[in-house]
Image: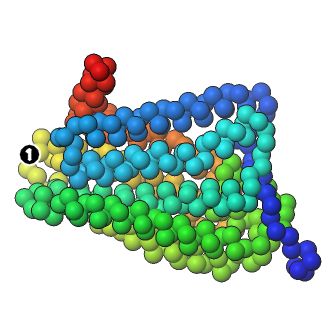
Amino acid sequence: MDAANMTTAKDFYLTELSDLPEVQIALFVMILSIYLITLAGNGAILMAIWTDARLHTPMYFFLSNLSFLDVLCPTVIVPKMLHVLFSEDKSITYAGCVMQLFFLIDVVGTEIFLLALMAYDRYAAICSPLQYTSIMNKQLCVQLAAGTWVTGLINSMVHTSLIFTLSFCGPNKINQYYCDIPPVMALSCSSTYPTELVVLLVAGILGGGAFLVTLISYVYIISAILRIRSADGRRKAFSTCGSHLSIVCLFYGTTIATYVRPTSTYSPKQDRIVSMLYGVVTPMINPMIYSLRNKEVKRALVKAFRLKGFS
């Protein structure tokens, strides 16, 4: 394409969840309700962990990081989505799109690494129970958690810089209700092959490594559980990692369907549904999984709310 025809993107335009005016209000109420439930649920988990000394353990320390990420993820995309639904102003500035994509990839990447770290923690607890407290000491937990956040940040910087070095000539209509890698890359009028290759390579090394750690940890965990003779012992052992395994399956399933494939296979309608699951619905479900299946968390929540009511 001639240089004269190359223009700098000033604004992008997002796609609404529905083009039917009669359902806009219903969608606005539904998305807002899910967002508020997400904030309340994850906020309750954080409050329970912070206020109950019995939950000051590695597993719940990592869970508090997960809950914080589950607050950040919808916060990156939902407010703009609600603005589009309420005002019908579908535009997002170039800088706004860059920042939204950057923080979204940062949160998603950090959560992938954190889930791997949580799987390793459960491996250490179940496969080496006598050495667990010495292996997962407080200093190491803080260092590992900080490492996941730093790695997620670096991963996001690489992806964002690669995406926005592409040329966008217009029309800049994003087939998604927020800025994400596949729909933004699909708008480029320059060759995306080198960028796709590097993005897939980085995602494959970092994401694949995290997935491998998670997979190997659960192979050892399940093997150790099956060796337990008593049914009650197996049930108790599995209950300590069942919640985490449920979240791993839900999160990995939706993120792999979104990111681990070439842009040529990008399907706007399908991706809007899948991204709604991991970006909006999953953060709401995660605290429910932990609170409903975990007696310690439920006791801590009851205690925290009683103290709050008393005060």
Q: Position of residue 201 (x, y in %)?
A: 53, 77
**Residue corresponding to mark 1:** 230
Nearest to the observer: residue 121 or residue 234: 121
116 w.r.t. 76: above or below: below
Q: Which quadrant holds the C terminus?
A: top left
Q: What's the residue at 66%, 38% (across, down)?
A: 82
Q: What's the residue at 23%, 30% (across, down)?
A: 299
Nearest to the observer: residue 145 or residue 308: 308
Locate residue 264 relative to residue 169 in the image: left or right. left
305 w.r.t. 183: above or below: above
Image color mode: rainbow
Q: Which quadrant holds the N terminus?
A: bottom right
Instruction: Identify the amino acid type marked 1.
Output: Ser
156 w.r.t. 18: above or below: below
Q: Position of residue 234 (x, y in %)?
A: 15, 47
Q: SS class of the residue under badge 1?
A: loop
